[in-house]
Image (cartoon, rainbow, N blue to C red):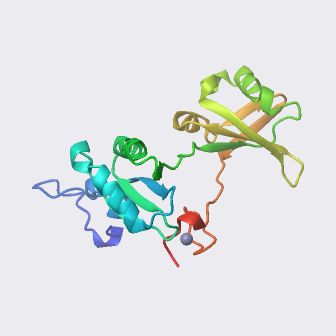
């Protein structure tokens, strides 16, 4: 993407087909690396090599018949096969088909996408996992969060002995709660994203684990 300084402002002339800087920015297609992909990995149940697994998949599963586009099909260092598509439905269908047709020899696994998690700081001592939902609902109706939108995950005490609650929410609930304060007992509790960083032991890069590492 161009830096602001490289783009001449068009604010004074709206004539012709030239686009405004803001329009140019919005109209930019996502870069290849930003395009969303959906993946599954295939693992062997009976010591197949990557090449064998590829052949098995290719002979039994037909992406043409399934009308599915495969954006990636490659072996990983951990002996698994990686398959990527640009569509969630495609990857689910593919996973199901592989497990149905090659289930005796192969297993297709789709990674579970974690819901966002939020941390609620300094919750009262009387709050436990068991009553957390109820207490949140009782005092925070103006936040309009549905009861089933959140699952209390766990509680922990920080260095200052404050009790914090981590909850799993859906995206709608995250938007409603983020940056808000939650009333709990006699406390006003800040809410923030709870991010546990996923870092690879092997190459030290982020967002994958060592067992899925493609680096050195
Ligand atoms: Zn790595």
Which residue occupies 64% across, 23% down? 147
User: Nearest the camera: 102 or 199?
Assistant: 102
**Residue 107 in the image: x percent, y percent?**
48, 50
As drawn, the residue found furthest toward the bottom would be 216
In the figure, is residue 152 to the left or right of 169?
right
Which residue occupies 28% across, 57% down? 28
User: Nearest the camera: 188 or 38?
Assistant: 38
Question: In this rendering, is residue 213 above or below 24?
Answer: below
In the figure, is residue 110 to the left or right of 63?
right
**Residue 146 in the image: x percent, y percent?**
60, 24
Which residue occupies 41% across, 46% down? 95
Quadrant hosting residue 59: bottom left
Task: Count how many numbered circles sit on residues in the image.
Answer: 0
In the figure, is residue 76 to the left or right of 165?
left
As drawn, the residue found furthest toward the left would be 16
In the figure, is residue 49 to the left or right of 119?
left
**Residue 150 in the image: x percent, y percent?**
64, 32
Whether residue 70 appears in this view of the structure is no
User: Nearest the camera: 131 or 78?
Assistant: 78
Ligand 1 sits in quadrant: bottom right
Question: In this rendering, is residue 211 above or below 156?
Answer: below
User: Nearest the camera: 38 or 24?
Assistant: 38
Whether residue 202 appears in this view of the structure is yes
């Amino acid at each position: 993407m161009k830096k602001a300084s490289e783009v001449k402002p068009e604010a004074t002339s709206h004539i012709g087909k030239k686009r405004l800087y803001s329009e140019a920015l919005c109209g930019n297609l996502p870069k290849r690396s930003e395009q969303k992909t959906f993946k599954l990995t295939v693992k062997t149940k009976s010591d197949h090599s990557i090449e064998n697994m590829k052949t098995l998949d290719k002979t039994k599963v037909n992406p043409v018949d399934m009308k599915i586009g495969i954006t990636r099909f490659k072996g990983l260092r951990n002996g698994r096969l990686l398959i990527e598509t640009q569509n969630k439905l495609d990857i689910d269908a593919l996973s199901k088909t592989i497990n149905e047709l090659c289930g005796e020899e192969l297993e297709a696994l789709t990674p579970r996408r974690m819901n966002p998690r939020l941390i609620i700081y300094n919750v009262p001592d009387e709050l436990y996992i068991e009553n957390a939902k109820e207490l949140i609902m009782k005092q925070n109706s103006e936040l309009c969060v549905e009861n089933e939108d959140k699952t209390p995950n766990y509680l922990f005490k920080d260095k200052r002995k404050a009790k914090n609650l981590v909850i799993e929410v859906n995206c709608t609930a995250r938007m409603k709660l983020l940056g808000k304060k939650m009333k709990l007992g006699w406390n006003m509790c800040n809410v923030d994203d709870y991010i546990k960083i996923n870092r690879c032991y092997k190459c030290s890069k982020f967002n994958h684990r060592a067992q899925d590492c493609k680096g050195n």
